[in-house]
Amino acid sequence: MPPVQLAPSILSADFGRLAQQIQAAVAGGAQRIHIDVMDGHFVPNLTFGPLVVEAARAATDLPLDVHLMIEAPERWLEAFAQAGADVLIPHVEATPHIHRALQRIRALGLQAGVALNPGTPALMLAPVLHMVDQVVVMTVNPGFGGQAFLPEALEQVRAVREMAARRGLEVTIAVDGGINAQTAPQARAAGADIFVAGSAVFRHPQGIAAGLAALRRAVGS
Ligand code: DX5
Ligand code: ZN
C-alpha cells in the first residue's frame, strides 16, 4: 500500500486567516490540502469557488485536491484548473458523463479523482477506475464538516481496493468525513491511504500541528 498522506480540509479552517492556517497545516506535516466546493444543489450547503482555490495556491506548493460537490462539474473544470488546482475530484453521482469529465480533467493537464457517496455502490466506479489517480470514498453524507463517521463506508473502501488490485491499478484511496484518531486506523486497515480531516485538524483543542500529529500516530506513520 502507498504511504499514508494527510489532507487537511480547509472547510473547518478560520477563513479570516486562511493563508496562515494552511501554512500551519504545511508546517505540521500535511502532504496535501483538500478543498470542499459545494453548490447548494448536489449537497445542501454552499461554500466557495475558484477564488478560494487561488488563495490556497498562493499560500502553499502542496498539491491541492479540489473536491467538487457540484452538479454538472464539467462546467467548472477549466476555471478550477486555472485557479491552480492539482487534482479535480467530481462525484460519480453528479454527472451522467463522468467518463467525459475525467477525460477533460486529464486533457487540462491535471490529475483526476472521483468521489463516491456512502449510498452509491462501489461498482459505479468500475468503468472509470483506470482513469483516476485518486478515489475519494465519502465516510459521511457530504455537505458539512463535523459529522459522525459511517462505519458501513469501510466496505466501500475495501471494495475499491480489491477492484484496483484485481486490475493491477495504482489508485490512491482517500477517506473523507468524520476522520479522527479513532476512525482513521479502521480506514487504514480497510485500504485507505489519504486521510482527509477538517475538524480533527483545524478544530483540535491543542491546535493544527497537534491535530495532525494525533492522526499520524493513529495510523502509525
Ligand atoms: C464533507 C467534506 C469533508 C469535510 C470533512 O462534506 O467533503 O471534506 O470537510 O470534515 P470533517 O473532517 O470535519 O468530517
Ligand atoms: Zn471533501
Image (cartoon, rainbow, N blue to C red):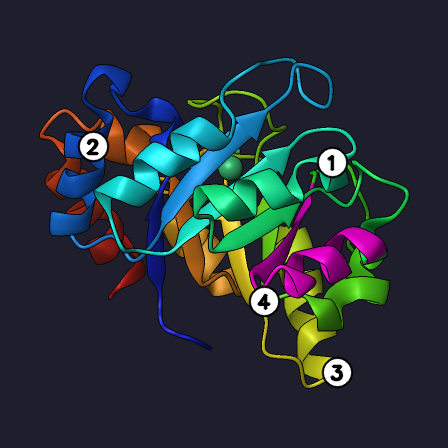
1 and 4 marks in contact (CB < 8 Å): no
How far is mark 1 from mark 4, CA to CA? 21 Å
- Mark in front: 1 vs 2: 1
Foreground pick, 195 / 57: 57
1 and 2 marks in contact (CB < 8 Å): no
> Judging from the image, what secondary structure is the residue with disc 3 in?
loop
Question: Of the residues under marks 4 and 2, which one precedes in the sequence?
Answer: 2
3 and 2 marks in contact (CB < 8 Å): no
Image side of residue 125 versus residue 182, left or right: right
* Picture layout, residue 10 above or below residue 113: above
Magenta span has 112? yes
How far is mark 4 from mark 3, CA to CA? 14 Å
> Judging from the image, what secondary structure is the residue with disc 2 in?
helix
> Judging from the image, what secondary structure is the residue with disc 4 in?
loop
- Residue most extreme to the right: 96
- Mark in front: 3 vs 2: 2
Identify residue type, mark 2. Ala
Q: Which residue appears at 66% of the width and 36% of the height?
A: 76
Q: Which residue, given by chain and number where applicable, does mark 4 sit on?
A: 133
Q: Residues within 10 Å of mark 1 (few under 14, many from 20)?
A: few
Q: Which residue, given by chain and number where applicable, does mark 2 sit on?
A: 19
Question: Of the residues under marks 1 and 3, which one precedes in the sequence?
Answer: 1
* Picture layout, residue 171 above or below residue 167: above
Q: Which residue, given by chain and number where applicable, does mark 1 sit on?
A: 75
Magenta span has 65? no
Foreground pick, 70 / 173: 70
Foreground pick, 188 / 97: 97
Question: Of the residues under marks 3 and 2, which one precedes in the sequence?
Answer: 2
Q: Which residue, given by chain and number where applicable, does mark 3 sit on?
A: 167
Q: Which residue appears at 76% of the width and 62% of the height?
A: 103
- Residue 39: where, in percent of width, then height? 64, 20
Report whether residue 152 is seen.
Answer: no
